[in-house]
Image (cartoon, rainbow, N blue to C red):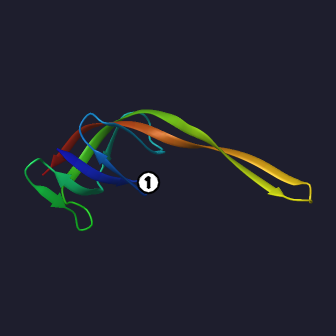
């Protein structure tokens, strides 16, 4: 059984027990429910949403907030003595999928 959910303008294929990194959710540690389920497969039947599957909820536990790898941007203009270096680390929330249910 698996589902495809959308969170933070990204789509993830999830199964029970998966641990995924989603864009930062400003929630305390605990439980979160993803209600934007685009596709649900229970092994025998596939349900495709229009645009989302009605009455389908994916439950997850929030494990921790983490930072991704550092991305360096560098700007340079020749013969003008202009150099600018910047770094960025995207923040993510690590969640563990506990239950996929449809009513």
Quarter that holds the N terminus? top left
Closest to the observer, 76 or 68 = 76
The 10 Å Cα crowd at callout 1, few under 14, some 14 to 19, many 20 or more, is few
Residue depicted at x 92% and y 55%: 81
Whole-percent x, y for residue 43 in the image: 11, 47
Farthest left residue in view:
44
Callout 1: SS = loop
> In the rendered image, which quarter is residue 29 located in?
top left
Q: Is residue 11 left or right of residue 4?
A: right
Farthest front residue in view:
78
Determine whether 57 is above or below 47 in the image: above
Determine whether 53 is above or below 95 in the image: below
Count of number-bearing discs: 1
Q: In this view, does 86 lie to the left or right of 66?
A: right
Farthest top residue in view:
63
Residue depicted at x 9% and y 54%: 45
Residue depicted at x 24% and y 49%: 3
> In the rendered image, which quarter is residue 70 located in?
top right
Determine whether 69 is above or below 3 in the image: above
Whole-percent x, y for residue 97 in the image: 29, 38
> In the rendered image, which quarter is residue 11 located in?
bottom left
Check disc 1 and report the residue beneath it.
8
Q: In this view, does 80 lie to the left or right of 97?
A: right
Residue depicted at x 25% and y 62%: 52
């Amino acid at each position: 059984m698996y589902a495809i959910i959308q969170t933070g303008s990204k789509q993830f294929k999830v199964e029970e027990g998966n641990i995924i990194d989603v864009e930062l959710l400003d929630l305390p540690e605990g439980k979160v429910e993803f209600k934007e389920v685009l596709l649900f497969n229970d092994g025998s039947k596939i349900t495709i949403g229009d645009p989302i599957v009605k009455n389908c909820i994916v439950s997850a536990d929030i494990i921790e907030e983490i930072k991704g790898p550092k991305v360096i941007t560098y700007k340079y203009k020749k013969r003008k003595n202009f150099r600018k270096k910047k770094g960025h680390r995207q923040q993510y929330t690590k969640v563990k999928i506990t239950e996929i249910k449809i009513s």
